[in-house]
Amino acid sequence: MEGAAEPGNLAGVRHIILVLSGKGGVGKSTVSTELALALRHAGKKVGILDVDLCGPSIPRMLGAQGRAVHQCDRGWAPVFLDREQSISLMSVGFLLEKPDEAVVWRGPKKNALIKQFVSDVAWGELDYLVVDTPPGTSDEHMAAIEALRPYQPLGALVVTTPQAVSVGDVRRELTFCRKTGLRVMGVVENMSGFTCPHCAECTSVFSRGGGEELAQLAGVPFLGECPELVPGSRPPVPSLPWAGLTSVPPVPEGEEGMGAVSSSLLGPHATLLRPVAPPPTPFSGPSWVAGPGLLGGPRVWRWKPSGSASVLSMATSGSGASS
Amino acid sequence: MEEVPHDCPGADSAQAGRGASCQGCPNQRLCASGAGATPDPAIEEIKEKMKTVKHKILVLSGKGGVGKSTFSAHLARGLAEDENTQIALLDIDICGPSIPKIMGLEGEQVHQSGSGWSPVYVEDNLGVMSVGFLLSSPDDAVIWRGPKKNGMIKQFLRDVDWGEVDYLIVDTPPGTSDEHLSVVQYLAAAHIDGAVIITTPQEVSLQDVRKEINFCCKVKLPIIGVVENMSGFICPKCKKESQIFPPTTGGAELMCQDLEVPLLGRVPLDPLIGIQEFCNLHQSKEENLISS
């Protein structure tokens, strides 16, 4: 990987993945968080860089609100979720005096902070850096890509929801990726359906099929859909004690859980890591199985590997049931 | 609340370009030269233009995907049901313009007349303007930095021939950045009635919406109230209600109580809204009217 070996920069980061969507509210931060947790579960050291300066969601999603950023001899120390330092975070959320404080900045100031996040944070040795972005195709995105370009990001995971108004915005994001030379690793369709906790009927709350059609239209891999929104009323993840990730629901073993997507990155059939992957045949992309969600309630994703008749459903007890 | 954001002193501040937080800002030299202190002449021009607009409402949310554009479109259509009321819907989400699709106006073009740009009329009394009408293809991405987006917003406010309008509804992108600062700045002299803030019930939305409320206070924008969208889902099969986005921290109701802003109401999640056919429904209705 290129980049001067200066202390505090990204020289020690092996792979960088940006999570993008032209549309807001499709689940970029959720996907970023769960991908990072799954990669960690696979034994990797992961960092999450949150460049959504106006709406930083990552600290809350990982129960790290209120944590402070400290200076070290190599720059800013990222916030570590555990003593093993297997997950490190950086977000403007950690720099605010109050959680409700608005970051009312124009583009140049946002650009400057994002550059600092890249150059001044002592990320150290990481296997993966997941970069969570805000919606759109503007300052934050351009600043992030410019700052990360010397480190040759792996590419972008593009998140959408099925409905036309999301797909309409995400098409523009795919154009943005093309114009900036950022490889699209695949399209993920989130919020594909909702299973009623009362009668188990699955309803396409936000229409259906948009993600697959989008991927086909753009000639990029369709990584799969998250068929179910999160039902139920499980309490949110409380603030994590320094002692460890005891409050975070565990990601299940093996191919279940977000491990399914991380396997696409890591495993023997790691198509996402190949420099040039031909687009898959239509509608053959895998769906996912995920472990318990972070935001309250179990999150049930069905894994349907390409060409396989087997379906691995979530093994954890109480999955899919409202609590 | 502070008058200005306490990190950036503001382009018109005495400390502009000179403060410690200005170090590294690309506009530092410009601000230090005092150029930022000169009021933009467009503000007066927009004030003149807005004299024919009786009420101006911004639809905001710190969070993306909560239904700002959907709400704006529904509000505009609802107000336009009174044929004697002239409604204008302005979409200043430059990177993700959803209004043309939601209103069934994709593919429409903006025309220029002697009195400025003509909005696209979906009804006789409902005109719409969006950057979406200026793009030649649905795949075109608007990859602009802040200043260029600000310039487009200025043109939308100054150069569009809205005519006599009772309500101007402005749909905004998520966040608290260039677009929001610009629209508030450009309309400052023209008086904005207030902002309607959209949220969904879950905490990850509410935490961004609190920031938006904070932003409104900082820029002295009155808050008309908060609307909680996607609040409950009725299963089409068993008709029982579920919470897809559970209000684990009290939802918008508790947030509004804490921050002393009105809760205008709750809107449930309707699967019909998502489908393309819904966007086309209004287009079909118009076509039916024309053909009949």
Image (cartoon, coloured by chain):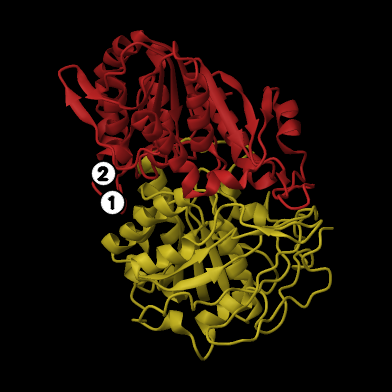
Question: Can you identify the residue that label 1 sits on?
Answer: B140
Who's yellow, chain-wise?
A: A
Image spot of residue A224 (x, y percent): 53, 71
Image coordinates for residue A174, horizontal then vertical, percent? 36, 60
- Is residue B105 placed above or below A266 in the rendered structure? above
Q: Position of residue A140 (x, y in %)?
A: 40, 50
Residue assigned mark 2: B135
Contact (Cβ within 8 Å) of mark 1 with mark 2: yes
Quarter of the rendering occupied by the N terminus of chain B:
top right
Q: Colour of chain B?
A: red
Taking depth in this image into account, of B204 and A221 the one nearest to the observer is A221
Q: Would residue B220 be visible to someone looking at this image?
A: no
Lateral position of residue A13 relative to residue B52, left or right: right
* Local secondary structure at mark 1: loop
Q: Is residue A190 above or below residue A43?
A: above
- Amino acid bearing label 1: Asp
Residue at 74%, 53% in the rendered image: B237
Q: Amino acid at mark 2?
A: Leu
Camera-side residue of A40 and A290: A290
What residue sits 51% from the left and 66% below the top?
A188
